[in-house]
């Protein structure tokens, strides 16, 4: 680099100047001596030439070090100031410069900081105007995002290349359930990812062609449906609708997929069809036997033994038909039990709804005044409300109860819901009868019983006498809502914004034939990753213990699309490493091995460019494990360490902390794989405009520039 050469020249310059000065002095003195004097002096100098050279070398070394230090402090300070100023200008960083140097440089730095403050004030004013102008558009987008997030159906929107640009929370949960890789930290769904990782490309193309044909024939709202199976054996019913260009309604820019998992429905329908078929066939045979027996029984000349035998046939066929009808009735009841899915519901809302319905439909007051706050249940709210209303109705009708109380608490990992009243206790026979009778509320009846509803929830139900309060109660034990898989990424995710499951800018993104290296950095998708390891020597037995990654698509960091997984290294964890990354042996015990995790990470990073800080270190670990896992990482790799040396060659440090400070990136979760990946991703996004300012805009240009830095020679 040019600046490095100037520093080297500063170190060597004293030696050269001193040598020239000494040579000039010697020649000048020699010119003043006569020939005899020079002949006399030369033997004396030859004996002391080594001493002269040592003195010259020592003085040159001291002066060189002093001059090089002076260059770094005075001369290179202006270059460092220029690099940091460029980061402020090109990267949009808002912070004050603090580069040591001469008084004139400090004055220039002060003036520059004043300009930065003025720019910040002007930028703030401009941002306010832009935000005010874009408020209506952002409001519409937020409404759409909110609508998509709350839909109970799975919805995925793709551009014509099959790249996902919008999905809702329901789709994310459904795809996670379909993915075998979730247990190893990966997910199938993500902004910019291909829908063809789930669905067959030819199947989607056929449906899209059908939609286009109907659109060309003048259909107002064309759509197509297909059923497909997943790798996990699930059946999905998919409805496709087109997304049209508002300016050219006949031009498609993408498509919407509405998904419904029909695996259970399909199995239930098959079972019901088989049962009805058996019932029909067996009943036809039974009816034939009954008809023949009845006709013979009408014969007055039939002897007693034959009559008894045919009467036995009638009894057996009637019993067989009764069993078959009872089996169909039980199957229907079981289907009714599972018709309504269990959903998360806040306990306070459930009890408030129950109290309101009891007061509205029964001659009875209901209060819910003892409810544990923020308690969420996983219940079928409809059947449970019907059950509470049914029990309260029996109390009102048969025991003239005029006040019931509802309360809810958490007890030993379950929700404890009580229906209380004052009065005489119920007998065991009465409670059993109420529990096994079919639920009936007013004119509405159901095939379900209280016991059926409790079994549906995997809970328990009993009657109890509360002697302290002189009250009776029905107690239900119900399941609590599952918290779900809590990502450790919570410490680095933005908590004050809606999860970003959409990017409408990708409607215009189309795959082309341009080579990957010639594509602009802003157009590419990146997987930014980091690893935590047992040590720093991958070729001496150290292993990966954690992989964390996030995605950058269309120039935006997708904070909700992360990969994070601990790995069992199958070896001891050194205490020195535990002090740094905080991962203990207990945390990795029972975690999947690298042979399971690496294929999942490979799927997560598919069709993207890998980005890491000091990527040579992380890639060495991945490459060593490739043989065990059966996958290879063939995609291009960018290293923020090398890119920092390209952008800021005069800076003294290119550590992740130093780069983040220069570029105004806040560090959270340091020395965790996902935390470091998040910081690296933000740093990389700040670097892209700085690289563009140097004419580096494509992937190939970035890789070439990085390989020319002196740090590119580091190997592991």
Image (tube, helix red, strand yellow):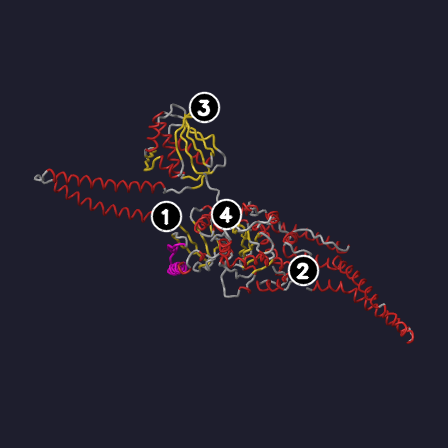
Q: Which of the two labelled residues, at mark 1 and mark 3, occupies the earlier sequence position?
A: 1
Q: Residues within 10 Å of mark 2 (few under 14, many from 20)?
A: many
- State which tag comes first along the sequence, 2 or 4: 4
Of 165 and 658, which appears nearest the observer? Answer: 658
Find out whether residue 536 is within the magenta segment: no
What residue is pinned by disc 3? 468
Say what secondary structure mark 4 lies in: loop
Image height of 253 relative to 366, above or below: below
Q: How far apart in space, not on screen, are marks 1 and 3 (Cα)? A: 48 Å
Q: CA distance from mark 4 to mark 1?
A: 32 Å
In front: 190, or 459?
459
Q: Residue at (54%, 45%) from the top-left corner?
A: 586
Q: CA distance from mark 3 to mark 4?
A: 48 Å
Residue at numbered disc 2 = 649
Residue 237 pos. (x, y %):
38, 52
Specify the segment rendered in magenta: 204-230
User: Residue 670, position in %: x, y?
Assistant: 60, 49
Residue furthest left in the image: 301
- Give the mark nearer the N terminus: 3 vs 4: 3
Q: Measuring from the top left, give residue 584's x and y in whole percent.
A: 56, 46
Q: Does 598 sit left or right of 97 as displayed?
A: left
To which residue does mark 1 refer?
Answer: 264
Please report whichever mark, 2 or 1, sits nearer to the chain's N-terminal start. 1
Disc assigned to residue 296? none
Location of mark 4 (residue): 590
Gap in Å between the C-alphas at discs 2 and 1? 61 Å
């Amino acid at each position: 680099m040019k600046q490095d050469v100037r520093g080297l020249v500063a170190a060597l310059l004293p030696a050269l100047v001193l040598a020239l000065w000494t040579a000039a002095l010697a020649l000048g003195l020699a010119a003043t001596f006569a020939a005899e004097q020079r002949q006399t002096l030369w033997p004396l100098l030859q004996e002391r030439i080594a001493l002269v050279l040592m003195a010259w070398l020592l003085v040159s070394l001291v002066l060189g070090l002093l001059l090089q230090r002076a260059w770094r402090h005075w001369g290179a300070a202006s270059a460092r100031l220029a690099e940091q100023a460029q980061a402020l200008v090109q990267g949009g960083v808002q912070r004050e410069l603090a580069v040591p140097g001469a008084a004139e440089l400090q004055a220039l730095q002060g003036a520059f900081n004043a300009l930065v403050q003025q720019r910040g004030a002007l930028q703030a004013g401009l941002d306010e105007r832009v935000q005010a102008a874009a408020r209506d558009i952002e409001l519409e987008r937020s409404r759409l995002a909110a609508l998509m997030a709350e839909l109970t159906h799975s919805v995925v929107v793709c551009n014509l290349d099959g790249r996902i640009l919008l999905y809702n929370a329901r789709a994310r949960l459904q795809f996670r359930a379909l993915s075998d890789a979730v247990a190893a930290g990966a997910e199938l769904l993500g902004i910019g990812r291909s829908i063809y990782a789930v669905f067959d490309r030819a199947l989607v193309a056929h449906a899209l062609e059908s939609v286009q044909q109907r659109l060309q024939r003048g259909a107002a709202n064309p759509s197509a449906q297909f059923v497909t199976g997943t790798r996990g054996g699930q059946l999905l019913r998919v409805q496709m609708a087109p997304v049209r260009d508002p300016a050219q309604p006949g031009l498609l820019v993408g498509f919407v997929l509405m998904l419904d998992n029909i695996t259970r429905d399909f199995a239930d329908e098959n079972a019901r069809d088989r049962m009805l078929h058996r019932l029909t066939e067996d009943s036809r045979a039974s009816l034939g036997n009954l008809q023949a027996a009845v006709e013979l029984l009408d014969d007055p000349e039939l002897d007693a033994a034959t009559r008894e035998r045919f009467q036995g046939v009638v009894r057996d066929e009637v019993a067989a038909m009764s069993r078959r009808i009872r089996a169909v009735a039980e199957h229907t009841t079981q289907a009714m039990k599972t018709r309504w899915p269990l959903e998360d519901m806040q306990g306070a809302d459930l009890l408030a709804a129950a109290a309101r319905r009891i007061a509205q439909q029964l001659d009875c007051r209901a209060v819910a005044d003892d409810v544990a706050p923020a308690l969420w249940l996983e219940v079928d709210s409809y059947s449970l409300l019907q059950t509470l209303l049914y029990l309260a109705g029996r109390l009102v009708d048969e025991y003239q109860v005029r006040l019931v109380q509802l309360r809810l608490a958490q007890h030993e990992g379950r929700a404890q819901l009580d229906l209380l009243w004052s009065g005489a206790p119920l007998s065991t026979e009465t409670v059993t009868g109420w529990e096994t009778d079919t639920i009936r509320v007013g004119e509405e009846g159901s095939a379900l019983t209280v016991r059926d509803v409790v079994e549906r929830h995997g809970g328990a139900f009993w009657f109890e006498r509360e002697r302290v309060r002189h009250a009776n109660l029905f107690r239900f034990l119900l399941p609590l809502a599952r918290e779900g898989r809590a990502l450790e990424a919570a410490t680095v995710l933005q908590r004050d914004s809606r999860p970003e499951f959409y990017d409408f800018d990708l409607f215009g993104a189309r795959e082309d034939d341009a080579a990957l290296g010639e594509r602009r950095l802003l157009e590419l998708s990146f997987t930014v990753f980091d690893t935590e390891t047992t040590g720093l020597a991958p070729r001496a037995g150290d292993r990966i213990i954690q992989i964390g990654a996030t995605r950058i698509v269309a120039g935006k960091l997708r904070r909700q699309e992360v990969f994070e997984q601990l790995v069992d290294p199958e070896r001891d964890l050194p205490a020195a490493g535990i002090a740094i990354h905080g991962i203990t042996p207990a945390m990795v015990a029972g975690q999947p091995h690298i042979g399971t995790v690496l294929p999942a990470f490979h799927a997560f990073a598919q069709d993207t460019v890998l980005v890491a800080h000091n990527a040579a270190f992380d890639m060495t670990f991945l490459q060593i494990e490739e043989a065990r896992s059966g996958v290879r990482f063939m995609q291009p790799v960018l290293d923020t360490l090398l890119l920092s040396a390209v952008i800021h060659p005069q800076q003294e440090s290119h550590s992740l902390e130093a780069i983040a400070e220069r570029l105004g990136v806040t560090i959270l979760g340091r020395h965790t794989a996902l935390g470091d990946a998040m910081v690296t991703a933000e740093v990389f996004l700040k670097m892209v405009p700085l690289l563009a300012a140097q004419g580096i805009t494509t992937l190939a240009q970035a890789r070439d520039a990085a390989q020319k830095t002196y740090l590119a020679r580091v190997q592991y």
